[in-house]
Image (tube, rainbow, N blue to C red):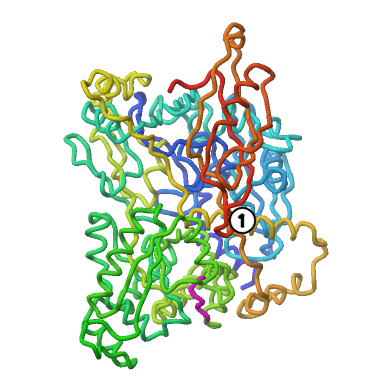
Amino acid sequence: MSRFFIGLLIILILSGCAQQQKFTYQGEKGGTLIIATFDEPSNLSPVYPSFTGLSPVVKLLFAPLHKTGPDGKVMPCLANSWEYSEDMKTITYYLDRNAKWSDGTPLTAKDVVATFEALKDPANQYPLIGRLRFIKSAKVVGEHAVQFEFRRIYADELLNSNLYPLPAGKIKGIKNLKFMDYTRKPDITSGPYILNEWNPGKYIELIANENYIYGRPPIDRIVFWFPASYDELLDELKQKHVDIVLDVPPDRVEKLDGYNVKVEPGQSYVFVGWNNKKFKKALRQAFSMAIDKKSIIKDVLKGYGQEAYGPITPGHWAYEPEVKNIAYAYNPQKAKDLISSQGYRDRNRDRFFDGLRVEIIADKNDPVKSATADLVAKQLRKAGVRAVVRKLDTPAFISRLLKKDFDAFILGWNVEKEFSPSPIWNSRGVYNFVGYKNTDIDMLIERGILTLDRRESKKIWSEFQKRIVEDAPYTFLYVPSVIELVRSGIKNVDVKDARLLTEKLDELWIPATTRVKVTVADLGKRYRESQKKAARPAAPAPRRTPTATAESILQQSLLAQQQAEAQKTEQKTEKPSEVETKKPEGEMKPPEETKPAEEKPTQPVIKTLPQVKNGIIPVYPDVAKRVGATGMVFVTVLVGKDGKVKKAKILRSFGNAACDKAALDAAKKWTFIPGTINGEPVEMETTIPFRFPPPEE
């Protein structure tokens, strides 16, 4: 069989013969879906996801070339089919001729290519540009056909070329997409919903897109409401004014009449990382036996999680169930015996092994990880290990990781569908903080990334997991669940589906008999008024917003490093080398130009941006009120090492001088937690967006 047909078979397996799948919406039309979340997006563009990932709002506004189906396999979206070249170095996507923008204009290959070029432009600072580093070019090969060419053959060609197109007419010639009005208020989109209104700090209202590729979705309106506090949210839940609550922390799960708790498998794992130079394999194995994962899940996660056994989560396509039998089960007595076999003794009979002390560092801004560290230390002490916990500010915690100045630490990693573990598990990986070195693992990683056959790739990742679990560089603790509250009248929620709830919001529907009428502007109003009338009103709770934790900062830093590497690649000659053009024979091996075990990577620069400590809302000038001036003013501020604003300047204005002055005056009064580089405070610029008229306090 020729290599082309082998490759074609592989792709059909990968995509589940996606081109043959058809999709139609089911259920009654009509109604409004109210979704409560504390994670308000900073923009509505697929180009700039937050550190928590692409917002579900953005996923409803924009459609990709292909998406994930209920069975977890790739299915068509804007592209109704695609094909690979014989040498597997190009993919040609064929856009559905019915694909349209929400205003009814055709969505064409020019839009896809314009988007790709914008993403690759360094001026736009696309944070996920690392995923495009092996894509050489994108070109129009027909009004409804676009071809991607790759620099190398690798497993994630299909996933990495899956873009969310933007309209070429909107972005062509714009040198910084981040600050254009379209990024915050897209008026032309391609997804199942279109933007109707965004009231910052309060809600975003979407309405059904009649021109969506799959037709009009069932629900008329979807509203994302951003409550100011849990108490405000709880009051609306008791009135059944909220249909879904996203990302509920395990300690805030409420068992309410008329609501179901939906628990979905998480995509990240939390672990203890051991300093592999300080603690040899036998000790690391003993430490793992001393830790009771079940009790941690019960006490810290309130039962909303499952045990982690290795570097890939159970819901991932590459997960190997056999690692459960290889992992070191909880057995404190066996842990003590193993420690004793390494020569440690308790000569002074204080119940601790002499000379064996472990300091566990944790990010104190992450309460779940901090609580986990406390329990791990307690369990180690029961096994005779003198364990203590030190909770550090996020920058200091990251600095200790970079310097490898630790005995142990608590952290978590997200496991992407596009599995590429080199930064963490390669012997020279930039995030291999524990100092784990195994040349067999290095080779397995390269083979796994380059292998196109999903079945063969799974065998490679299976061996990868078994080797790592055996060596115990980490103690894998738990996989936190994704928790949501869902009102009982919402349909198509519990259908067997490989996707998370936030990936299929457009497929939900509400029977007419169970719909609840809600005035969006009144959400939270009753609670706020009750607080005003209270004889001794409680101090208003600060608005809960997602915190930039250590792993989110590290992930952003990795993406920034990949961005720099991608830009360097762009500057190199496009002339292919002999290695690149030579077809592999037999088992695919890593290309000679990629020598991860021989090249020392650049030390990562971990940057934390200034975080707002106290923000001032600008005064709406009378002269601006009289003329009805509305728009956005972006102010760039230089934040000093002390967190105070040293300088402020207008980055972008909508042309009203009075509003510009009001924005500058307000910006100068802001205070921040200063930005850091590798844990050290530095002067750093950041940008503050001000809306006029300002939102109500």
Number of marks in the image? Answer: 1
Q: Nearer the viewer, residue 97 or 271?
A: 271
Specify the principal SS of the magenta part.
Answer: loop
Q: Residue at x 34, y 53 (%)?
A: 367
> Does residue 303 show up?
yes
x and y percentages locating residue 129 in the rendered image: 64, 52
x and y percentages locating residue 166 in the rendered image: 63, 36
x and y percentages locating residue 572 in the rendered image: 80, 61
Q: Nearer the viewer, residue 165 or 403?
A: 403
Asked if residue 18 lies left or right of residue 240, the reply is right
x and y percentages locating residue 165 in the rendered image: 62, 40
Q: Residue at x 61, y 73 (%)?
A: 1
Asked if residue 52 lies left or right of residue 4, the reply is left
Magenta residues span 433-437
Asked if residue 516 lies left or right of residue 597, the reply is left
User: Where is mark 1, residue-wise?
Assistant: 131
Disc 1 on helix, strand or loop?
helix
Kind of residue indicated by mark 1: Arg
